[in-house]
Image (cartoon, rainbow, N blue to C red):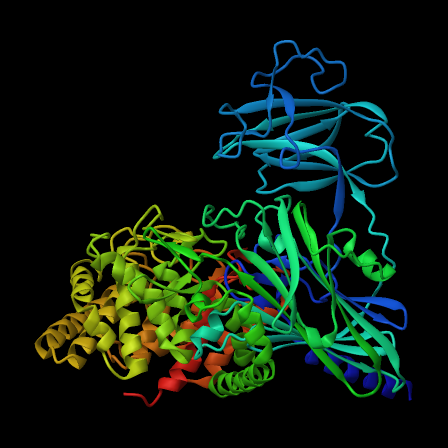
Amino acid sequence: MRKCLLALCGLILALTVKAQDKAPAYPLITHDTYFSVWSFGDKLNGSVTKHWTGREQSLLGVLKVDGQFYRFLGAASKSYKSLLPTADEQAYQASYTFNTPAGNWMGAGFNEQGWSKADAPFGDDHTAKTKWNTADIYFRRTFSVEKLSTAQKYLKLNHDDNVMVYLNGKTIYQKEGWVHEYIYIPIATGVLKAGENTLAIHCKNTAGGRHLDAGIVEEIPDGAKVLEAVQQNVKLTATSTIYNFACGKVNLEVSFTSPLLLNDIELTARPISYISYAVKSADAKPHQVDLYFSASSTLAVNQPNQPVNAWQNNSGGLAIQKAGTVEQPILQKKGDDVRIDWGYVYVAVPAQFKPVQYLAPQNESLLQFIGQKYPTAKEITNSRPLNLASVIPFGKVGKASVSKYLMLGYDDVKSVAYFGAQLEPIWKKSGGNFESHPIKASQDYASIKQRCTQFDQKLYADALRAGGKAYADLCKLAYRQSIAAHKIVYAPNGDLLFMSKENFSNGSINTVDITYPSAPQYLVYNPELLKGMMNGIFYYTESGKWKKPFAAHDLGTYPLANGQTYGEDMPVEEAGNMIILTAAIAKAEGDANYAKKHWETLSTWANYLLKEGFDPANQLCTDDFAGHLARNANLSVKAIVALGGYAQLAEALGKTEEAQKVRTEAQAMVKKWLELAADGDHYALTFNDKGTWSQKYNMVWDKLLGLDLFPKEVYQKEISYYLTKQQAYGLPLDSRKTYTKSDWILWTATLADQEADFQKLVNPVFRYANETTSRVPLSDWHETTNGKMVGFQARSVVGGYFIKLLAEQWKNKK
């Protein structure tokens, strides 16, 4: 009997585990590279919700059931009181010297004769108040604390590079390397004392920039007596993340829906997500239920201490709140680890739900809900982090489910700069102010939710037929992430622009070798969006602003698309990418009109590939993290396939002579490639390095476009060899390292003609996505031996996972 019970328990546990979808991080709000909020753990209430960069952007949800409080969404952000303010809070001066001091310079009572005193922070960037250009800086601040509380004390520090920190002569922190934001390091009890104290720091520059700012804070206890709701399940679909909780004697379902339906560009571009709640009794008895939701103003800042304004009002049947920075520095910041600090975050709740909304400091908001003492101010100006709080009464809830929702939106005012013009968000084309859009979104709530459900079901069913369950699960995980790394706008000439950001890679905007791997998702669901990724690159050349005979690498650094900023060209890579994708658009649409529009430019790039593409010089390719590589066999494949695609386009446009000429050249290149790259049972990494290998993922377009340039035996020879090189979490990129790119594995796997071979290559990628300990929005660059990310996160290139679905969609397409 005991064995039967154990077996039954094991079965129940297995079914429970199977029911919960796994992801490295769970998408909650996914619209563009700025308006993007994620849960970085398996439990929605296990940590503070974050922007994809990892900075806290708190969404908090608490359900009150019969007087007891259950937190189901997020965790309270820590709040601090400054004992010794840093420069982002209050101007201060510190003593410093660039020369190595003698004696006990880090202790109290040290004679600072010969030291200077100046404004912090110290460094060599634009934020520095005092310039530091030497190898070393020694820093001292003497301060008094009248009375010590029992609260935990922290060193608040931002440094670049190596640092040693002393408090009253005792070492409290040391680190080799640098940080890119303020960090909080606990200070042991007894080191800080009542009366006079001395904070001393030695910071050493080892490379790159310099920066130093430091202070001391203490934690403010939140005082809230709130239980954790018990998460029972989480389910991912293409457009939604759905959680189920037990909150005492009530069950709660929470759905985060970003309606990114790619065949509806205006809807996809409208930056409004729904958060839906369904509550029902778990014991069939009635229970009194109220719901608390808050969004932090940190969704609208780059740094948490930027002053903000907030307002609330009623409009069009909605209770509406908004918040944004006081400064509103529109399009004044660029870079990778940067968040938006202009425009306004919105929370909107249908008035029919009788919500109570209020504005409050972040550390007070939840306590006010618990105490039912709500502030009445309709406006707060020049404040530090605020919560936009909404209380939605559900009343007495029984066994019948009660559903309500709210909306989270973002008005970015100006979206990107494009060759000097500041482009407006696409929603402005339909007129009205931003508030008219949550009103419309609320009116359309039921129909949009239904459309999303139907789309999710079809996407999953299509992916399941194309590649099996593991493949379908990867596609639904990738879908929102890829879209949310873009912004949809219109160029001054009317062209649609779908501008990508190279998230946690280098921050470039509209990178061609990010467009290339992302393309399959958009070829499947709306080729106009792929054109939107390419239009700016064509314009850059055709306007005369880019004069080289190959395509640019990028259009700038996000959000400023004013011209390439990457330090080096990728000639064969980018020319090949643009031609291949133009050929792919022609196949998707059934005509070559897009190619016709840009034929002169495509011809220039094809001529470059004819001269330089077959045996590439020591160039970078899209795998630039792996370094330069001469005679790259996979890059050569790209050039050959691109020329085959160009010939196919020429034929479609009636340019028969040109088509025949270029195809003949491409066929001759293939013959030579087979000789130079041959390495026994596979083909080498480079033409001159035998005993090496690489994924020939570029060859997949020979198959998809039906070019028939490479013999089918080449595909199978490579696939058979790759299966001997598999690691636990995937196929390495090539023989140089054991790391890989998961998007390329899916492309390589699509070369396989045997379903079993495809599954053998895809299943380890699925295992990586499920088991990685790197809890960030899915990284496309990971280590195949242990499943940890190597670099990159939240990038659009996971749209490349859809290539197998694209291949199935095109299987019988001429």
Horizontally, residue 213 falls left or right of residue 369, namely left
Q: Point out the image quarter for the C terminus.
A: bottom left
Residue 238 visible (yes or no) = yes
Which of 779 and 87 lies nearest the eye of the viewer? 87
> Residue shown at 23%/57% (left/top)?
541
Which of 197 and 134 lies nearest the eye of the viewer? 197
Q: Is residue 386 above or below residue 445?
A: above
Residue 681 visible (yes or no) = no
Horizontally, residue 625 falls left or right of residue 451, namely left
Name the quadrant containing residue 169.
Answer: top right
Q: Give the mark count.
A: 0
x then y, percent, for residue 547: 20, 52
Q: Is residue 282 above or below residue 325?
A: below
Which of 747 and 779 lies nearest the eye of the viewer? 779
Name the quadrant containing residue 110.
Answer: top right
Horizontally, residue 388 falls left or right of residue 542, namely right
Q: Point out the image quarter for the N terminus.
A: bottom right
x then y, percent, for residue 759: 50, 80
x then y, percent, for residue 658: 11, 73
x then y, percent, for residue 511: 37, 58
Q: Is residue 34 above or below residue 180?
A: below
Q: Is residue 472 above or below residue 118?
A: below
Which of 673 and 82 lies nearest the eye of the viewer? 82
Residue at the extreme left of the image, as rendered? 657
